[in-house]
Amino acid sequence: MSQLQSEKYGVSVTLESLQDGQRHIVTAAGEAASRGAQLFIRYEESEQGPRGESISVRTTLKISDSELKLIRHGGIESEQSFAAGRRLPGFYRSPYTQFNLSTETRKLEIKRDGRSLDARWEYDLYVYEELSGQFAISLHIQEEPQS
């Protein structure tokens, strides 16, 4: 068995996003694995499609000391990267639309405490080089007790 296998553990994920006074909270059970200085978190969430249907999306967070990457697969495919003071490219694809985007991160704080993690970041989202929105995100990862 590889060392990566033995390092996987269950976590609860709370991701809170604030845009224009609108708060959106996602809570999910997930799995975490450490690879060197990086932490990988995977969880599944359900999003509502434009026709009211439920779309399943697998989300992977790749977290290092100074950078965070959000990768989504399934009914929606997207990639966003965040590093303080940098503008990084990404994309968004769904069955209904697709576009390139970039994120300009104003602030990024990542605090790891054993198998728990808290991260907060603020960024401007650009779609086709035009400012599309300003976001403030907080992420809390907590190890789930073994049953």
Image (cartoon, rainbow, N blue to C red):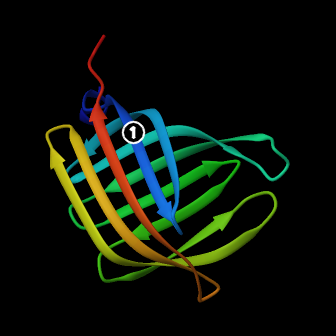
The total of numbered circles placed on residues is 1
- Residue under the point 22% across and 40% down: 116
Q: Give residue 54's position: percent from left, percent from top.
A: 74, 39
- Residue under the point 46% across and 37% down: 27
Using the image, determine if residue 21 lies above or below residue 89. above
Amino acid, disc 1 = Val
- Horizontal relation, residue 59 to residue 46: left or right: left
Farthest residue toward the right? 51
Q: Which quadrant would the N terminus be assigned to in this image? A: top left
Using the image, determine if residue 8 lies above or below residue 136. above
Q: Nearer the viewer, residue 129 or 14?
A: 14
- Horizontal relation, residue 138 to residue 75: left or right: left
- Residue under the point 43% across and 51% down: 16
Give the secondary structure at mark 1: strand
Using the image, determine if residue 103 lies above or below residue 75. below
Farthest residue toward the left? 114
**Disc 1 marks which residue?**
13
Q: Which quadrant would the C terminus be assigned to in this image? A: top left
Q: Give residue 104's position: percent from left, percent from top.
A: 42, 80
Q: Give residue 102's position: percent from left, percent from top.
A: 52, 79
- Residue under the point 25% across and 59% down: 64
- Horizontal relation, residue 22 to residue 121: left or right: right
